[in-house]
Amino acid sequence: MVNRIRRGAMAWLLPWRCTLCGNPGMPGLDLCAACRADLPWNTSACPGCARPLPAGASAWRCGACLSHPPAWDIAFSALHYALPVDALVQQLKFHGRLARARLLGELLAQALQSERHTPWPAALIPVPLHPNRLRERGFNQARELALPLARHFAIPLRDDLARRIRATAPQVGLTAAARARNLRGAFAIDGAPPAHVALIDDVLTTGSTLTAMSLALRAAGSMQIEVWTPARSTPEHAPAQTR
Ligand SMILES: [Zn+2]
Ligand SMILES: [Zn+2]
């Protein structure tokens, strides 16, 4: 116990250090200013799907979102799922490096803070893992990412609202229609969710998981649904393993 307290105090006293190059970090961030500036920021993205808008685009949403609006209202991804962001996400998910969640969550919070002009959601809802997967991994990366966001914005983290009730087959290699079928009925919502919520996940790729969850939340009464992820990937560059 004493050791734990001492270690905690030491961690507090140690300066922040850049995860990528080892130089002193910026205050409150495991990253130096130069490495932060070099990250693949997802600027001028479509607010519907968080994909980059073509240069000089005049519409405020991309053509895909205008013709087929997503199940959620707004999507925001701070970074592209490209080096070194993909490596940070994989270290978090597959190697249990929870400090990566603190870094990615804080980067997402800073990007949201600087670009946002609309009201804030009343709850942050991490995409739940199926209990079997949670037991296997020992943590839910989406919840770990939601923690720094909840702290940064003082928005309640509500991991009691949504449950994954059906284990689903891996999504990789499935068509969009097959993914949607695969996820039908995968989530249950407990109680009445707030009208305005933000769903938190690590990477937005096809969006099939977040679509299934958005539909479940809307059926349970949510009116304004946002999707926040540190990284945006495209199906062509999908993560090796999705969940
Ligand atoms: Zn650095
Ligand atoms: Zn779009």
Image (tube, helix red, strand yellow):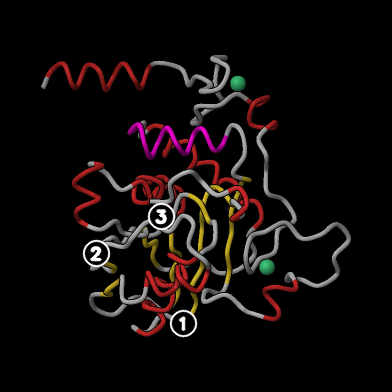
Task: Classify 189 as above or below 94.
Answer: below
Q: Give the secondary structure at mark 1.
A: loop
In depth, the one of 164 and 101 nearer the eye is 164
Task: Find ligand 2 in the image and state its quadrant.
Answer: bottom right
Mark 3 → mark 1, Cα distance in angstroms? 21 Å
* Amino acid identity at mark 2: Asp
At x 35%, y 22%, the residue is 12
Residue found at x 71% / y 58%: 45
Q: Amino acid at mark 3?
A: Ala
In the image, 189: left or right of 182? left
Residue at disc 2, secondary structure: loop
Amino acid type assigned to the residue bearing label 1 in the image: Met
Instruction: Answer with the quarter of the image where residue 122 lies.
Output: bottom left
Classify residue 183 by image quadrant: bottom left
Residue 154 image label: 3
Residue 86 is covered by the magenta coloring: yes
Q: Secondary structure at mark 3?
A: loop
* Picture disc at residue 45: none
Rate crowding at label 1 as few (under 14), some (14 to 19) or many (20 or more) other CA atoms within 10 Å.
some
First in sequence: mark 3 vs mark 1: 3
Closer to the N terminus: mark 3 or mark 2?
3
Give the residues in magenta: 85-96
Residue named by callout 2: 160
Q: CA distance from mark 3 to mark 2?
A: 17 Å
Q: Point out residue 48 in the picture as x, y percentages from the top left corner.
A: 63, 69
Identify the residue under disc 1.
223
Question: Residue at 33% of width from left, 83% of height from top?
Answer: 220
